[in-house]
Amino acid sequence: MDSGKKMVLRPRPSLGLAAAPGAATLPKPPSSASGRPSVMQAPVLVLNATFEPINVTAVRRALVLMLKGVAQAEETSHSEVHSTSKAIRVPSVIRLVSYRHIPQQSRALSRKNILLRDRNTCQFCGISFPASELTLDHVLPRSRGGRSSWENLVASCYSCNNRKGDRTPEEAGLKLQRRPRPFTLHTSRQLMRLIGHRDEKWRKYLFY
């Protein structure tokens, strides 16, 4: 069964988002007793200096960019994060201060990007799950020559993964929701627009 096997995947490029030594310390997000995702994990639209949408990141990473002077907030939400000395409005859209050349290539192969491509939806039963309740499944099992590639990896819930086991979907009586493909720039833009339908602050940057 694929859920118990590990894969070695290339890390996703960071666009210089990692905090540098001596950088400002992020305020602590409010705790969530309800078990809901932290505000620091909420999606933020990233624009190039030319206002072209280029990525979606988390609030925590967006705040790091802002505190380092790499980006500035174009839109904010009503939420705030607090430190001992100040409160910062949570960004919804940020823009890079300097233009970054974005290569026209697909994203690095990673669990996060596979789940993003498949929209956190099991590709066998079609039900959406939190990322923690999804695993990656090799459509053609590794034991039968299946590779760890965009075309052979899909998001799968634990139930479907257990049902499929070390078989092909056809042998297990399962059907893929859609054919797995690489995560291209076109795929990324489609996902940005889907999120944009839920956040009106994004719309003017995604729809022309």
Image (cartoon, rainbow, N blue to C red):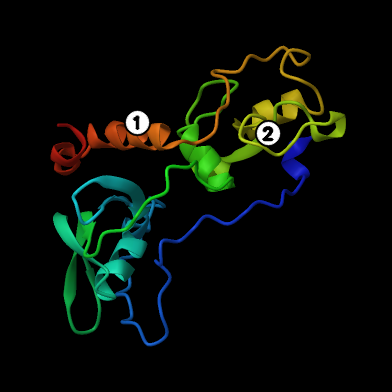
Count of numbered circles in the view: 2
- Quadrant location, the C terminus: top left
Residue corresponding to mark 2:
137
* Image position of 193 with respect to 172: above or below: below
* Image position of 77 with respect to 138: above or below: below
Spot occupied by residue 195 in the image (x, y as percentages of width and height):
29, 36
Furthest residue toward right: 143
Spot occupied by residue 20 in the image (x, y as percentages of width and height):
41, 80
Question: Mark 2 belongs to which amino acid?
Answer: Asp
Question: Mark 1 belongs to which amino acid?
Answer: Gln
What residue is drawn where x is 24% and y is 36%?
A: 196
What residue is drawn where x is 15% and y is 38%?
A: 200
Can residue 78 be spotted in the picture? no
Q: Which mark identifies residue 65?
A: none
Q: Please name whichever residue, 203 or 31, is drawn nearer the observer in this view of the structure.
A: 203
Residue corresponding to mark 1:
190
Q: Please name whichever residue, 114 or 164, is drawn nearer the observer in this view of the structure.
A: 114
**Considering only order in the chain, which callout, 2 or 1, is on the residue closer to the N terminus?**
2
* Left/right of residue 4 with respect to residue 113 in the rendered view: right
* Left/right of residue 96 with respect to residue 123 in the rendered view: left
Distance between mark 1 and mark 2 Cα atoms: 23 Å
Q: Quadrant of residue 204?
A: top left
Q: Quadrant of residue 15?
A: bottom left
- Quadrant location, the N terminus: top right
Q: Secondary structure at mark 2?
A: strand
Q: Please name whichever residue, 35 or 192, is drawn nearer the observer in this view of the structure.
A: 192
Spot occupied by residue 44 in the image (x, y as percentages of width and height):
28, 51
What residue is drawn where x is 37% and y is 55%?
A: 41
What residue is drawn where x is 63% and y is 39%?
A: 135
* Image position of 77 with respect to 83: above or below: above
Q: Secondary structure at mark 1?
A: helix
Label 2 environment density (alpha carbons within 10 Å; few <14, some 14–19, many ≥20): many
